[in-house]
Image: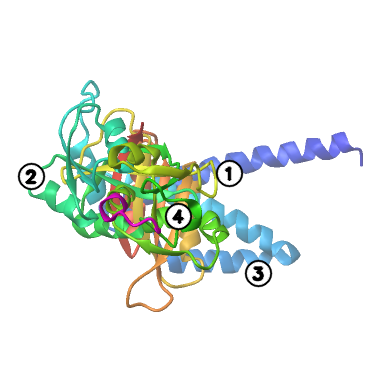
Amino acid sequence: MELSEIRREIDEIDQGILELFLKRMNLSIEVAKYKIQNNLPVLNRERERQILKDVMAKAGEDEAYAYRLFSVLMALSKAKQGNLMAGSAPVCEAIRASVKPIDEIFPETGMIAVQGIEGANSQEASEKLVKRGNILYVKTFAAIFDAVESGFCDYGVLPIENNINGSVRAVYELMRERKFAIVRSTRLNIRHSLLAVPGASLSDIREITSHEQALGQCSNFIHSLGDHVHTAACLNTAVAARDVAKNGDKSVASLSSRQCAKLYGLNVLKDDVQDSANNYTRFILVTNKPAVYAGADRISLIVSCENRAGALEEILSMLSSRGVNMSKLESYPVAGRDFESQFYLDLDANIYAPGVMGMLSDLEKRCESFTFLGAYAQV
């Protein structure tokens, strides 16, 4: 048989498949209407298992391919049903209530809670996130939430992840516990310098202090100094610089920004000591009054699923069946539960895009736990 003839037959088969696929999707609409009328869920796992079992039994040596094909078909069908049934889901109602008018611009002023002191990276981030904000410095991440919850501050700025050292899990946990929302984010290129009191040299240093994330981001440099140099974590990179200046000990240095050298009268022993020049930290702007502004093109979630084979794949199929790109997936263990995890998800998605609200509704209904962290823009 000639290749052209083979391709002609394939084209005919593909046309038939397309016609049957469209017919199947139209029937999915009828199924969705019935489920809405009878208050039934989208997912019927027992029926799905039976369909896949029958398919594999009939497919012979191609059972693996047939399994994948019908899994995708059912995922697409569930996506269409979910879009039609999304209307009254709690997450969708909450999002609609928080959407700002399209002509309302993001506030350029406000009181902002920032962890640390003058010279902290969070200070620089806050200036990018709210152009003319007034800063209130606090000691801990939890204190940021307290300041906003009390009404004393409008927003809080928090580091959420570093591309080298990973997520700041304490922040994610506070976001989940306190039910705050992300309304904006930004990325900073973080550059660390080794700072010490005037008169100190690199050979004098026996201790390096900084925030634990900064210590992790500069681990190669720290190890290069030898075993006689140990580290001590503190609350903030700027706090580290201030304390080094205050104590006046030549054997102690801080990993801080170069700006801190000027602020606290320290000398720069070495610049750019981070492991990589491509060292970025993402900061988020949070509030206890959820708001979605025009241009919001990122969605962040925390979800968990059943501890069984295929459970995570089902969650991911809800995204792929709607063409939603996932820019982050990170797991972390659930405290007190053996071998069970929750997942951080960042999605490149706009709530107005077709299928996105249906996807969020499906996730909320089908995940063991579901926390919507916000829909926002990165600036």
In the rendered image, residue 245 lying in the magenta stretch gets the answer yes
Measured from the top left, where is residue 318 in percent x and y? Answer: 45, 51
Residue beneath label 3, please? 57
Q: Residue at x 7, y 44 (%)?
A: 151
Q: Which of 191 and 173 is in front in this view?
A: 191
What secondary structure is found at the residue carrying circle 1?
helix
Do labels 4 and 1 touch, CB within 8 Å? Answer: no
Residue beneath label 4, please? 166
Do labels 2 and 4 touch, CB within 8 Å? Answer: no
Q: Which region is colored magenta?
A: 244-251
Quote the CA–CA distance across marks 2 and 4.
Answer: 31 Å
Q: Residue at x 40, y 38 (%)?
A: 188
Which amino acid is tagged 1? Leu
What secondary structure is found at the residue carrying circle 2?
loop
Label whose residue precedes the other's in the sequence (1 or 3): 1
Which amino acid is tagged 4? Gly
Residue beneath label 1, please? 20
Label whose residue precedes the other's in the sequence (2 or 1): 1
Check the picture and name the quadrant holding the C terminus: top left
Q: Dot 3: within a 10 Å radius of its alpha carbon, few (fewer than 14), some, or many (20 or more) residues?
A: few
Do labels 3 and 2 touch, CB within 8 Å? Answer: no
In the rendered image, residue 36 lying in the magenta stretch gets the answer no
Quote the CA–CA distance across marks 1 and 3.
Answer: 21 Å
3 or 2: mark nearer the eye: 2
Quote the CA–CA distance across marks 4 and 1.
Answer: 46 Å
Check the picture and name the quadrant holding the N terminus: top right
User: Which label belongs to residue 151?
Assistant: 2
Q: Residue furthest top?
A: 103
